[in-house]
Image (spheres, rainbow, N blue to C red):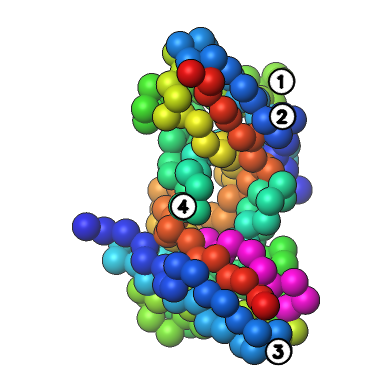
Amino acid sequence: AQSVAQPEDQVNVAEGNPLTVKCTYSVSGNPYLFWYVQYPNRGLQFLLKYITGDNLVKGSYGFEAEFNKSQTSFHLKKPSALVSDSALYFCAVRDKQTGANNLFFGTGTRLTVIP
Amino acid sequence: DGGITQSPKYLFRKEGQNVTLSCEQNLNHDAMYWYRQDPGQGLRLIYYSQIVNDFQKGDIAEGYSVSREKKESFPLTVTSAQKNPTAFYLCASSLGTGSGTGELFFGEGSRLTVL
């Protein structure tokens, strides 16, 4: 079975400070991992993905994420937060071994960047 | 521009009525998906289709129906059998099974409210 855990419902950070949004996953095989962002009443926008190779993945809007196989984690990071980063963030996983492409999503973490 | 179009953006329904949500994509993707989003529960898969004229139930298919008569279109019908239909519905698409890395592209969503 595949699953994703986002342990924090809410993360608050001051503008200009680094931010981290946590994600851990569980799959039977090797994972594809994704981060998406959602603004109010909008669809999800793709930020970045880990497929294979370098454990540090860089994505859109200055975000990056680090894949840690031993800790089964894929935390989202940004060196300096902007107020415009305030949104709902979703981590998702797919097992490479499965045939279907549907992703399993975490419950989301609401990021608030305080001016 | 290529993308996914969902309509309507907002929809109100009386109890006991069926309603159909539209999803059209011009990305030439083989696979399409419907997710339901409720506060604090993340995204849950309703149905998905990997090819025309074929679809599979997701985790919460009861009370919903779909069709896939054309590659571009994957409408979702919320039937009167769905006990709690008020939610935000998201349509997505991706390259088919075995193609690409499973990244999903999302529409802007449809918010259904049952009165």
N-term mark: 4 or 1: 4
Q: Can residue A93 be seen in this view?
A: no
Residue A33 screen position, x and y as percent? 56, 36
Which residue lies most toward the left here? B1
Residue type, numbered disc 3: Gly
Point out the tag, 1 or 2, that comes first from the N-terminus: 2
Looking at the image, tell me whether mark 4 or mark 2 is earlier in sequence order. Answer: 2
Residue at 68 percent across and 72 percent down: it is: B85
Numbered badge on residue A42: 4
Residue tagged by mark 3?
A: B16
For label 2, count other residues whose C-alpha is less than 10 Å away and answer few (under 14), some (14-19) or many (20+). some
Residue A114 drawn in magenta: no
Name which residue type carries label 1: Gln
Residue designated by label 2? A8
Q: Report, in whole angstroms, how far the alpha carbon at label 3 lies from the one at label 1.
A: 48 Å
Asked whether the viewer can see residue A114, the reply is: yes
Q: Calculate the distance from the C-alpha at mark 1 to the C-alpha at mark 2.
A: 17 Å
Nearest the viewer among B96 and A92 is: A92
Distance between the Cα atoms at labels 4 and 1?
Answer: 32 Å
- The residue lying at 70 percent from left, 39 percent from top is A4
Disc 1 marks which residue?
A71
Q: What stretch is highlighted in magenta?
A: B82-90
Q: Quadrant of residue A93?
A: top right
Residue found at x 62% / y 71%: B113
Dot 1: chain letter = A
Residue A39 % position (x, y): 48, 44
Q: Which of marks 1 and 2 is in front?
A: 2
Label 3 sits on a secondary structure element that is: loop
Q: In which quarter of the image is residue A46?
A: top left
